[in-house]
Image (cartoon, grey):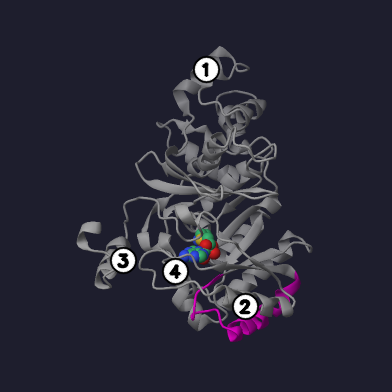
Amino acid sequence: MTTANATASTASDPGRPVNLIGLPRAGLEEFFAGLGERPFRAVQVMKWLHHRGADDFASMTDLSRVLRAKLEEMAVVAMPEVMAENISTDGTRKWLMRLDDGQRIEVVFIPEKDRGTLCISSQVGCALDCSFCATGKQGFNRNLTTAEIVGQVRQASRRLQGVVTGRDRAITNIVLMGMGEPLLNFDAVLPAIDILLDDLGYGISKRRLTLSTAGVAPAILRLAEVTDVALAISLHAPDDALRDQLVPINRRYPIAELLDAVRTYLGKIGDWRSVTIEYTLMDGVNDSLEQAEALANLLADLRERSKINLIPFNPFPGSGYRRPTEARVRAFQTHLLERGFATMLRTTRGEDIDAACGQLAGNFEDRTRRRERYIARLKDHGVITHQAV
Ligand code: SAH
């Protein structure tokens, strides 16, 4: 499927140069076949692009001069440009990256003792409007292309060269948890996953590449057909009434349907692997012990196959929510642990540079006018004055 998509996007735009960063191995092989070249050209070029970070064809010295000239004409190597880099006191890095059309997205690198996680975006903005997420408040602009998704990793790898991480590669894990809903940009995300997993690309293990979704149930079923990367579900509520409020897409795909899709996915990826359940804790909203109990009951049959990831809410202006006290967060976690669930507390990273979950705002033109409505709401509540906008 990824090949077909990659080829379609190559073939549908005959006049425009192809960005080779966005072609998975099979797509690149087809591209070279179209030029009358042998498939191993794809191997050579992928190494140049993703391992050695070559930005021009002239430097690809194991290709013939004629082929290099042809590529010069038909193809490009382009990736998002870094506009700003912020480094947190805890070592977390956030980059504001600019796309070809001037839209801006954010990418975050989180170093830990045993790993380095890169959090990448799949869309410019997000259409889902989860009530507690800064990205959603900004509205939605467009899907990212495969090249723009892979380009974030390529650019981050370059930026991390020379940064001491204590490991031979800085990025060991990738999470599709930045801006956007990856399953609503399926056709671009899938080939990107292909390239990130490929040894000729970034060689990330499928267990260390996580796709996080707000719960597009039919797309989870589709995903199960074509890949087996790690899956995270943004659940955030133990019942439909509350989840309808927090994650509006729940009105379309309610919890029962979502968990059925998760069971199907688990059935495909192998008995020993589990799904991550993300649960953002908001004070007085979804953090009571009754709700912890309801969550344990809801997930009872998935106990051996799930890890619950508790995320204390990360505030942003005008969100209307508060982070619970540490005692409340601990009590919620303890309850789930006592019910036998592997339950982790996600420590907040990069807070001083607004790089934490749900704080990525980027900078783009909203096509849904959601940003205007949000700003109007902020004014109503006196959070901002006219001058501040
Ligand atoms: N659209 C995808 C991926 C992006 S969000 C999804 O919904 O899963 C990545 C995670 O951050 C999600 O679990 C999301 O619910 C959570 N999140 C969003 N806003 C947050 C906030 N303000 N504080 C804490 N977590 C938040």
Above or below residue 312? Residue 11 is above
Q: On the image, numbered disc 2 is attached to which residue?
A: 332
Q: Can you tell me whether the CB of the residue at mark 4 lies under 8 Å from the nearest atom of ligand 1? A: yes
Which amino acid lies under the numbered mark 2 shown in the image of this protein?
Answer: Phe
The magenta segment: 280-304
Residue positioned 51% across, 26% down in the render: 55
Q: Label 4's element?
A: loop
Q: Is residue 66 magenta?
A: no
Residue 8 image offset from top left, x and y in percent: 50, 42
Q: CA distance from mark 3 to mark 1?
A: 48 Å
Mark in front: 2 vs 4: 2
Task: Point out which mark residue 132 bears.
Answer: 4
Residues 376 and 68: in front is 376
Question: Quick check: marks 3 and 2 in contact, CB under 8 Å?
Answer: no
Q: Label 2's element?
A: helix
Q: CA distance from mark 4 to mark 3?
A: 12 Å
Which amino acid lies under the numbered mark 1 shown in the image of this protein?
Answer: Ala
Residue 330 image offset from top left, x and y in percent: 63, 74
Residue 278 image offset from top left, x and y in percent: 59, 67
Name the side, left or right, on which 291 lies relative to 85: right
Label 1 crowd bin: few (<14), some (14–19), many (20+), radius 10 Å: some
Q: CA distance from mark 2 to mark 4?
A: 19 Å
Q: On the image, numbered disc 3 is attached to which residue?
A: 374
